[in-house]
Amino acid sequence: MHLATAHLMTTRTPIQKLFSRAGTKARIALGWLSFATRLRPKTEFGDRTPPPAPDYSDRSQWAVHPEAPNKSDFKPLGRDARDRPTACGADVFFIHPTSYFGARYWNAPLDHAHANELVDELIIPGQASVFNDGCRIVAPRYRQATFYSFLRGTKSGRAALELAYTDVLDAFEHYLRHWNQGRPFFIGSHSQGTVHAMRLLKERIDGTDLAERTVAAYAIGFRFPQDQFENGYFKSFHPSRSAIDTRCIVAWDTYSDEGGPSHWIDRAEVWYANSNGTGTWVRRAHKRPVATNPLSWTNDTRAVAASANKGAVHVVLSDPRGVRWKGFGGENPIGLRAHSLSAPHVGEVSATLREDGFLYVSWPITKAFTTAIMPGGNFHNYDYGLFYMNMRENVRQRLDVYLQQQAR
């Protein structure tokens, strides 16, 4: 889920007001659950034929295609433009988060107008663009699982996620065959995209020569389990330990200082590969996630002051008053059009990793980063935006170190 421009609304939302009151955690959680339950598809996964599979030779099946115009080339206001495509030193295979919230399908059709609008006008400029200083970006459309798939751990929800992953894998294979040409690459993802990134890293990349070409994976916003780095599960990857670590996993999940995860209502699941080639979906609640502090790029628990925040960035819309927000989550476009990125908001938040593995931030200064907060003080929608400039710089750092290592 991602609402990078919800800051353009002029009044505090009811859910925001709830967060400001003491003693409302259970009420917020139950209200959220009630809302989410209304998103359940009316039929089971197997009762309907899935939408047609993608043809990745068709440019329209890509949110970001190397030879088609898109908004992944947006840069923060005031930043010097740099030459982008073929001179870039690495690629980024970016897997977008959930943008389909409907109950009509378990998997969104590839031409779903509103889901694609959210990707093209919010997610690509607001998240994927963080990689455009030194990297060529590719990002497939895929038959993403509907938002409800994460809410109950049902057979249909798992089937929807597995179908979505088959598209992501097909897109990655197309990328390797047609564009990679032996180049180093990053994996970038958020939310549902990270669910699929975890599996792609384990089942397709880990233990192969592709792992040697993986600079790092920024697998953000889905509680990458720490126990996946135990007992030899991953052969080639480890949690990031510093700003210049490579062949590593960079991950965090952001909450307000006074918030935190509600494990008791969390039914989302993570894929674990089995040694026999099969896999199992396991509930993620109470699992300690991999954690990196994007203000220090360490995984210790010391507080990092807001002075280390080099700039939070958000999407600026062309016509914010013309957006039909009441239609959000429906079948039709709501009038979103990204105009640019904001200038960096330097010093926006401090950040501290706690022993539970989650990242806790001070309350943002700018309203742009407070209008789409989720239950429990969850800054999920701002996992990228709050740390945009730190991420942008760090991608370049890791790439430079990787290229130096390869030149030896």
Image (cartoon, rainbow, N blue to C red):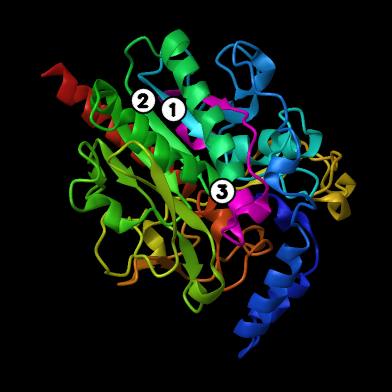
Q: Secondary structure at mark 2?
A: strand
Q: Which tag, 1 or 3, sits closer to the chain's start?
A: 1
Q: In the image, is residue 179 above or below residue 309?
A: above
The alpha-carbon separation of the residues under discs 1 and 3 comes to 27 Å
Q: Marks 2 and 1: in contact by CB < 8 Å?
A: yes
Q: How many marks?
A: 3
> In the image, which residues are magenta?
129-157
Please tell me whether mark 1 or mark 3 is closer to you in this view.
Answer: 3
The residue located at (49%, 73%) in the rendering is: 263
Q: Give how far across and how far down residue 71 sits, in percent.
A: 64, 28
Is there a contact, CB below 8 Å, between mark 3 and mark 2? no
Above or below for 171 versus 128: above
Is residue 297 something one can see in this rendering? no
Q: Who's the residue at 59% across and 11% down the image?
A: 67
Residue density around tag 2, few if under 14, some if 14–19, many if 20 or more, within 10 Å: many
Q: Is residue 258 left or right of residue 393?
A: right
Q: What percent of the width, then of the height, locates residue 156?
A: 63, 49
Residue 296: within the magenta?
no
Q: What is the number of the mark on residue 92?
A: 1
Residue position for label 2 = 185
Residue type, numbered disc 1 = Val
Residue at figure coordinates x 48%, y 27% from the top left: 169
**Which is closer to the viewer, label 3 or label 2?**
3
Measured along the vertical axis of the image, is residue 364 above or below residue 118?
Answer: below
Q: Which residue is mark 3?
A: 158
- The location of residue 377, given as percent across then percent down, is 56, 71
| Distance between mark 1 and mark 2 Cα atoms | 5 Å
How far apart are the alpha carbons under marks 3 and 2?
A: 29 Å
The amino acid type of the residue labelled 3 equals Arg
